[in-house]
Image: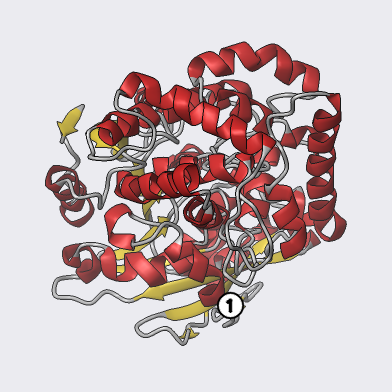
Amino acid sequence: MHTRHSSPGSPAPSPSGPGPRNHRRHRRRAGTLGTLLAVAALLASACTAGGSTHSGSPVAEAALAALPQSTPAALAPYYGQKLTWRDCGVPGFQCATLRAPLDYAKPEAGDTRLAVTRKKATGPGKRLGSLLVNPGGPGGAAIGYLQQYAGIGYPAEVRARYDMVAVDPRGVAGSDPVECLDGKEMDAYTQTDFTPDDEKETGELVDAYKRFAEGCGADAAGLLRHVSTAEAARDMDVLRAAVGDDKLTYVGASYGTFLGATYAGLFPDRVGRLVLDGAMDPSLPARRMNLDQTAGFETAFQAFAKDCVGQRDCPLGTKASEVGGNLKAFFEKLDAKPVPTGDADGRELGESLATTGVIAAMYDEGAWAQLRDGLSSAMRENDGAGLLVLSDSYYERDADGRYTNLMFANAAVNCVDLPAAFSTPDEVRRSLPAFEKASPVFGEGLAWATLNCAYWPVAATGEPRRIEAKGAAPIVVVGTTRDPATPYRWAQALSRQLTSSRLLTYDGDGHTAYGRGSTCIDATINAYLVRGTPPTRDKRCA
């Protein structure tokens, strides 16, 4: 599961397709939906500094000596490498390139190059080491996130004591990115009808998934086999050594919690202070994860519906109980007849793009007013421009029709991490009642969205598993009660699995909790990061 969706028009998180996703913005501080990651890929391209490894050097030998005896000697050059930091072209930041083995089982077979950035601790106070941050996805550009938000948006007391560090995971943005379709092809893909009404439309959806998968595999078949979360977590340990830290200090949001929990499971003795915000449950198979997420989006939508009817002019009705039915009816109208948007490339607002726009706004209640305006324009004035803006923010499409590689990396990681939720259209059809029960508005589309990994060019290498990380230092797991993309029950489940976990609950809306405006949440996490004081078990904040 992870944070978003790579399927046509369907933007929810799912391990078989795309999944959770906090990444791009840390709520209210980021402005318009999608702003941060929209520029992330541009910034990542500035990080081209080289790193070096020194096989057989005293540094490499010392690095190997510090690893478990089972560690292959071929990993010594990676753990012993010295990063060469250079100016990024972004004030206050330095960049470097980290080398990691493409295949950890065969480290002698070749490298992958990972883009890294840092902002050095500002002081005052003693430097505590490096704080690695990951905004989610999978596929979120961590470098763009750090340079545009976290490097200045994290609390001053945290930035004073830590070097703020980010690495684009393998296959993402500046790190040997997976590429699948060009802009025009992605435009067509995102407009595919993902609620097929007959065999013809079902065939068109399957063809779209196949073209997407074939595009991803055309030039990167070898890379696609090695973009798993487990391999990305191993890369984090190589980075930990390269920046000179004995233990990893880390804040991961959404899919970043799965990455952090995986690291803890692999290296429990190297866990420093870990915060997992908007937690995922690694023990779930893809189908269950998608079904849970569908229910999560329904929970968020019901909160939006209640808020909408409380406003002066809600376009979806005057009673919360009628909002869902009215929105569903509007989607059906768009399925039959899209509305104009004024888009320079001629795109109209059909059911797929409209649904994506609505789901995008569910990630942050700060976008609800924008969603109401977009719905009002589309439903009353036959103008779909507002919802198209929300949809484009979700897919990270810029005004020139270019997409970041977010959706490509999202599918690549999800499809290798877990076996596909469904193998055939018939399996999806049999599951539609369960998905539509979980969400009458979004269930059908999100069920079909999980079919994309059925056609992936490489087989999944991961599987559902509990992560206990026995022996790890205290790990703070954060859950939001009405989180759409990572349902609160996942945070509860992960907290039960991790033997050293402390569950921190945010009673609120939106995706993730840290930096959302809760003084209680922020103060609790800051105390843990700066003073090493974990919260009491099962602490709750509003």
Q: Is residue 2 above or below residue 28?
A: above
Circle 1 sits in a helix, a strand or a loop, which is it? loop
The picture quadrant where one finds residue 218 is bottom right
Q: 61 or 480, which lies in front?
A: 480
| Image side of residue 211 versus residue 53, left or right | right
The residue that disc 1 covers is 45
Q: Is residue 467 visible?
A: no
Q: Residue at x 56, y 24 (%)?
A: 443
Q: Percent from the top left, x then y, of residue 55?
A: 66, 72
Q: 457 or 498, which lies in front?
A: 457
Q: Percent from the top left, x then y, of residue 379?
A: 48, 42
| Image side of residue 335 versus residue 258, left or right | right
Q: Residue at x 69, y 47 (%)?
A: 191
Mark 1 neighbour density, 10 Å: few (under 14) some (14–19) many (20 or more): some
The residue under label 1 is which amino acid type?
A: Ser
Q: Is residue 524 above or below residue 463?
A: below
Q: Residue at x 68, y 48 (%)?
A: 190
Q: Is residue 121 visible?
A: yes
Q: In the rendered image, which quarter contains the N terminus? A: top right
